[in-house]
Image (spheres, rainbow, N blue to C red):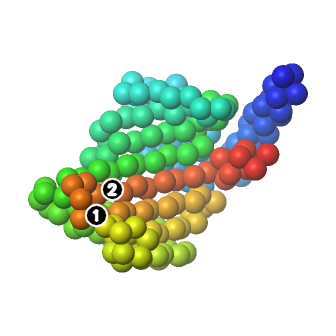
């Protein structure tokens, strides 16, 4: 049991060192104006109280039910390790009967992301009946300022369609590799 605590402490110290090194060379990426490593308290001071808090293993996640991204309301989840922001995600769930149609909303978000981050490092499209029977899928990946950004959207023949934009810091990946 002590060995597990020692490993967690080593990981936490490693994460703090990574954030210190990044700060020493100048912050490169911000999410809603927050650099990687921002504390939970700093986020809550600007964004307000979260609607939900969840902990899993060494991660703490705060969730806001309704935040705006590219003109669309979304759920926003922020992940912290050792009280440092390491990942952020917007999740969109749209009713297929709504206007404008989800595919048009998702493509609009795609256009905005491409305008902001440039041409993706990679992108994929899976038409209906190739990956999931009733789902058409698109995904885009950027590596910007040492941050991984993944945008995926899924349009279904069912009632709802989904999309997400995930921003991942280098510290999150390093922490999970330890």
The structure residue drawn at horizontal position 40% and vertical position 49%, both measured from the top left corner, is: 90
Name above or below for residue 16 compared with residue 53: below
Residue 5 horizontal/vertical position (percent): 81, 25
Which of discs 2 and 1 lies nearer the camera? The answer is 1
Name above or below for residue 15 compared with residue 113: above
Q: From where the camera sits, is residue 42 visible?
A: no
Q: From where the camera sits, is residue 30 visible?
A: yes
- Rounded to the nearest angstrom, the CA distance separating label 2 from label 1 is 8 Å
Please state if 60 lies on the left or on the right of 138 as rendered.
right
How crowded pointer 1 is (Cα within 10 Å; few <14, some 14-19, many 20+) is rated as: some
Kindly indicate whether the residue at mark 1 contacts the one at mark 2 (C-beta within 8 angstroms): yes
The structure residue drawn at horizontal position 56% and vertical position 28%, both measured from the top left corner, is: 55
Residue 86 horizontal/vertical position (percent): 60, 43
Q: Nearer the viewer, residue 95 or 150?
A: 95
Query: Residue 39 sits in which quadrant?
Result: top right
Name above or below for residue 140 compared with residue 37: below
The numbered disc on residue 162 is 2
Q: Nearer the viewer, residue 38 or 134?
A: 134
Q: Give the secondary structure at mark 2.
A: strand
The numbered disc on residue 156 is 1
Query: Residue 58 sits in which quadrant?
Result: top right
Name above or below for residue 84 compared with residue 21: above
Mark 2 or mark 1: whose residue is earlier in sequence: 1
């Amino acid at each position: 049991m002590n060995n597990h605590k020692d490993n967690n402490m080593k990981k936490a110290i490693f994460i703090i060192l990574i954030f210190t090194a990044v700060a020493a060379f100048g912050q490169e990426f911000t999410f809603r104006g927050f650099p990687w490593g921002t504390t939970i308290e700093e986020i809550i001071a600007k964004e307000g109280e979260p609607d939900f808090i969840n902990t899993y293993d060494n991660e703490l996640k705060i969730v806001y039910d309704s935040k705006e991204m590219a003109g669309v309301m979304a759920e926003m989840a922020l992940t912290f390790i050792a009280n440092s922001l390491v990942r952020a995600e917007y999740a969109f769930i749209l009713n297929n009967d709504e206007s404008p149609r989800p595919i048009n909303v998702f493509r609009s978000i795609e256009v905005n992301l491409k305008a902001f981050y440039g041409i993706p490092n990679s992108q994929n499209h899976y038409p209906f009946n190739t990956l999931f029977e009733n789902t058409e899928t698109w995904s885009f990946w950027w590596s910007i300022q040492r941050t991984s950004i993944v945008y995926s959207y899924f349009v279904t023949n069912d009632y709802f369609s989904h999309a997400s934009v995930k921003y991942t810091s280098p510290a999150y990946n390093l922490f999970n590799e330890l």
